[in-house]
Amino acid sequence: MNVLMCLAAILFLLMVGIGGKKGARSYIALFFNFGVLFLTILFMSNPSANPIILTLVACTVISCINLFYINKVNLKTVTAFISTIITIVILLFLIFIITDKAMIQGFGEEELDELSIFSLYVGVDFVKVGASMIIMSTIGAIIDVAISITSPMREIYHHNPTISRKNLFLSGLSIGRDILGTSANTLFFAFFGGYMALLIWYKDLTYSVGQIVNSKIFSAEIITILCAGIGVALIIPITSWVTAYFLVRNR
């Protein structure tokens, strides 16, 4: 506990020292986001609840916290919020279909020993839970890319108010191309870093390449990475178009 408190204090001091008031709001937003995720998990354990609807609500609340609470309500946060919701809706239906077809929902054979003492008849639709898990893993990256595009686009428009909508849109795409590669790699290393122990376990059990590729846990992780990359790629043109539309319309 002492180590956790020390790390939390160091993070708070760094965020406030570097980010000022916005850094303090960002630190508080971490706890708000944790509360939203915790409540979402509690509601998902209810068999009568729809995980897809809960995920859409949770993503909306998380977007509001990370955009409006941290950066306040302005044109760049509003356009980033609209773009995020559009992308989440598109991605959620795509992920739901992929999860159903790939059959990655539920638990893998590597987890059977830990689950053998529990009943598997919990009445929860694991296809929807699997889709919700993937979308919740990508919401942070999608919001980050959205605000990273809307902010410089607003600066471009501010310094060149006569710019056309098409040129402003192309500027947003150019900004997004620079972000795309680094964001995709960030997601890749973040997900694989969390499953490093699983890869070592595969090595100790002398899994073949075919067994690893066909493992449910490994497949679910790869699909999560690919879907996150798709979400990051989708948010770039959507955010560029929405931001260009609202900026030029306001002129």
Image (cartoon, grey):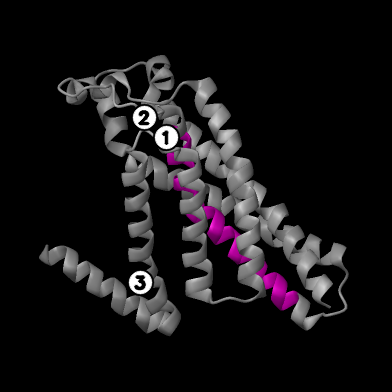
Indicate which label's residue lies in the foreground, 2 or 3. Answer: 2
Q: Position of residue 228 (x, y in %)?
A: 53, 43
Name the foreground residue: 194 vs 199: 194
Up/down of 114 relative to 32, above or below:
above
Indicate the amino acid at tag 1: Val
Secondary element at image label 1: helix
Q: Earlier in the sequence, mark 2 or mark 1?
A: 2
The residue that label 2 is drawn on is: 124
Is residue 131 magenta-colored? yes
Task: Give the alpha-carbon distance from disc 2 to disc 1, as whole Å.
Answer: 8 Å
Task: Give the alpha-carbon distance from disc 1 to disc 3, as whole Å.
Answer: 28 Å
Is any part of residue 151 visible from this angle?
Answer: no
The quadrant of the picture occupied by the C terminus is bottom right
Task: Give the alpha-carbon distance from disc 2 to disc 3, as whole Å.
Answer: 32 Å
Indicate the amino acid at tag 3: Ile
Mark 2–mark 1 CB contact (< 8 Å): yes
The quadrant of the picture occupied by the N terminus is bottom left
Task: Identify the residue shown where x is 31% and y is 45%.
Answer: 42
Q: Residues within 10 Å of mark 1 (few under 14, many from 20)?
A: many
- Indicate left or right for 106 with 152 as reference: left
Which region of the structure is painted magenta?
A: 130-156
Task: Identify the residue shown where x is 21% and y is 24%.
Answer: 115
Name the foreground residue: 5 vs 85: 85
Secondary element at image label 2: loop
The residue that label 1 is drawn on is: 129
Is residue 236 magenta-colored? no
Q: Earlier in the sequence, mark 2 or mark 3?
A: 3
The residue that label 3 is drawn on is: 28
